[in-house]
Amino acid sequence: MQRGPLSYLRQLDLLDSGRHFSGRWGRTVLLSVAVGVMAGLAAVVLETALHWGSELLVGRFAAPGGSEILLFRWELLLLPALGGLFSGLVVQGIAGFGPGHGTDQFVAAFHRHDGVMRLRPPAVKAVAAVGVISAGGSAGPEGPIAALGAALGSSVGRWFELTARDRRVLLISGCSAAVGALFGCPLGGALFANSVLYRQPEFESTALVSAFIASAVGYASYVPFGGHGTRVLSGTAGLEFQSPGELPLYVLLGVACGLTAIFFSIALRGVERVAAACSAVPSSLRPALGGLATGMLACLLPQVMDGRYHFVQNAFSGDLFAGAGAGTSWLGWSAMLAAVALAKCLATALTVGSGAAGGVLGPSVFIGGCVGASLAALCEALLPGYLPRDVQMALIPVGMAGVLSASMRTPLAAIVMVMEMTGSYGLIVPLMLVTMIAYLLGRGWGLIDDQVRSAADSPAHAGDVLVNLLEQYRVGDVLERDDFAHVRPATSLEDLLGRLRPGDCSTVPVLEGQRLVGLIALSELRQQLAGDELPSAVIAADLMRTQPFRLEPSYTLYEGLSALQEHGLDALPVVAAARGDNALVGMLRRSDVYAVVRRYVESMRQSLLREHAGLAAIGSESQLTHLLSVMPAPDAGRMERIPVDTTQLGRSLADLDFRNAMGVEVIAIQTADHLFLCPPDPRRPLEGGDSLLVMRSAAAAAELA
């Protein structure tokens, strides 16, 4: 059997040796660093391509960061259509991939595809996204880079033959590193990738450590290529929350951000439904039609083509208002900024919803900045000079976080991301307030369909209770140290079988001294045991497996059970890690692992009944249904439940002899705490509250009637 790279690394003690790291954590750190480097460099390539592409295309024909509106030019009309056509032909036409904005595919891969995300589709979509954004399409780069980083992590997990659980960890790590690098928010990127999976404010705790490491390394890999010090919004460092009198204004901003996010979601879903219904138009051409509609909007408001946040930056600094002369009132500015926010929602819906490559996180940040700027202008129009300039400016970064929080359903990540992206650390109080209000209003209209409500609803967490239990125990806690058979390499097959006793492991270790040299699985000896006589020339060395079994006492029971499953055996040898000579210390059996699970389940059942007595009825009905399912056909008799009376208390079924005395067969005893004892113990004294589940024969039932 061909062995993957993980097997060789294990032999070299680079990943699993407790002398360097603690097993799984050592592997996690090393692979997280590798994924972080790859995702950070991928972000460098994408950002460089976007910079040069935007300068070459949309930057030559439009100045979307200014205040000019109602500007009809053929370039503005047709450029987004050409970008959409390029995306459609590359992604749907040539490559044959379906639409999707990247983040949704990452979420679906986590929940529904065991952490498997192929690398080629995100790579192709990243190339297509560069064309879309460079041509003025209203989309963001974070969708493609999130998917590309996640696919890199998934590919590393598959290359190293990791379990589905570990693949999911690297999937999240890759997304964290890519988003954190591209947006300059390493902490925010890690929190975003861990929380965007769920509709509620919840984090994927199993991946937090790996995501933090990968995101830090990814950002560090990105910085030398021009990422240090760059901000989505500059000049916010001096802004601070100063007075509780500002809170009503921020409450209003939170409501506005939530309502805007709802409009954004409705627009995107509407375009997706229309695009799916246009069966007469090939899927590869639909992004071109969406781009053409985006171009029409751009002729009215060229600002919708801004993919680099220049318009929001100019509104923040005041250059936007100064450059347009004194003829526009603040009420007019407020209306214009609100129109840009809504138009950006529509333009992004038309671009991404029609199937063009690109993301929605970047546009969400842009839209939120416009909402904050519009509210600031409205306050200046209604109450001239009342609102300090710093508060007006603060509304813009806080608005960014508000729309991002509601549209992506990531309020906590939105706070941290915007603080890092803009440097507005002094605005933590309004950021907290606005993001939560916006999230509560807009959480029912998020932009990612594959999000589940919480970890409890994710197929990825179906076995969490048992996994957590098995990770609390070590192999050394339950292994069998003495009572098992073992042989030497020269032991004959006849002697081997003669040493086995009833109940022994079906797996026999082969030792030279105390050193493990091989393993014999008795289930694989059918050919040798098929004849009437045992072959005398066959010895243990001819039958044993010789691949390394790196199971050590410090491993968790979860890792031990995974190893049993991987090798297809009922028992595996455990070797001493400290000695390094493959010295055998015992055997881990499946039955030992299952015993731990059974004890835990029973203890939890008792705790459940103490806390929630009403649930006992459900357990009773479940057990009763199981009993009835194996009973004879209805014409064989009648099932009855008979309460134990006072004359029967303290006496056993053997004493009472129900079969002869009453013509019934006792199938089970139901105790006072609703537990079925089946088969019943004939020597157990009956207790108060017991009931008997009996089968009355058809003849006895007819006679009784």
Image (spheres, rainbow, N blue to C red):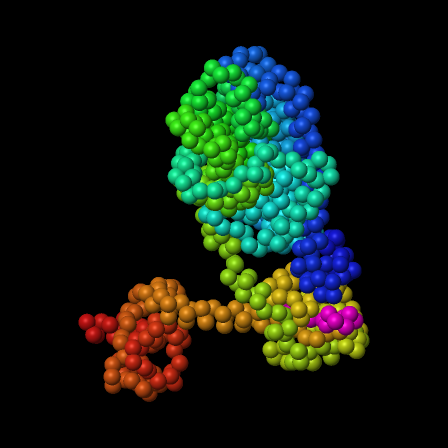
Residue 295 seen in the figure: no
Q: Is residue 153 above or below residue 324?
A: below
Q: Is the magenta region chiefly helix, strand or loop? A: loop
Which is nearer the eye, 499 or 71? Answer: 71
Q: Nearer the viewer, residue 225 or 632?
A: 225
Percent position of residue 105, x then y: 56, 40
> Does the magenta-highlighted stretch encompass residue 570?
yes
Q: Position of residue 326 (x, y in %)?
A: 49, 16
* Quadrant in the rendering for residue 255: top left
Above or below 17: residue 294: above
**Span highlighted in magenta in the image:** 568-582
For residue 91, side relative to residue 408 (left or right): right
Q: Residue at x 40, y 67 (%)?
A: 608
- Where residue 258 sits in the image (x, y, percent)? 42, 36
Q: Residue at 56% across / 47% down in the picture? A: 191
Q: Is residue 626 left or right of residue 73?
A: left
> Residue at point 50% right, 72% down?
599
Residue at image position (44%, 19%) is: 329
Q: Quadrant of the N terminus?
A: bottom right
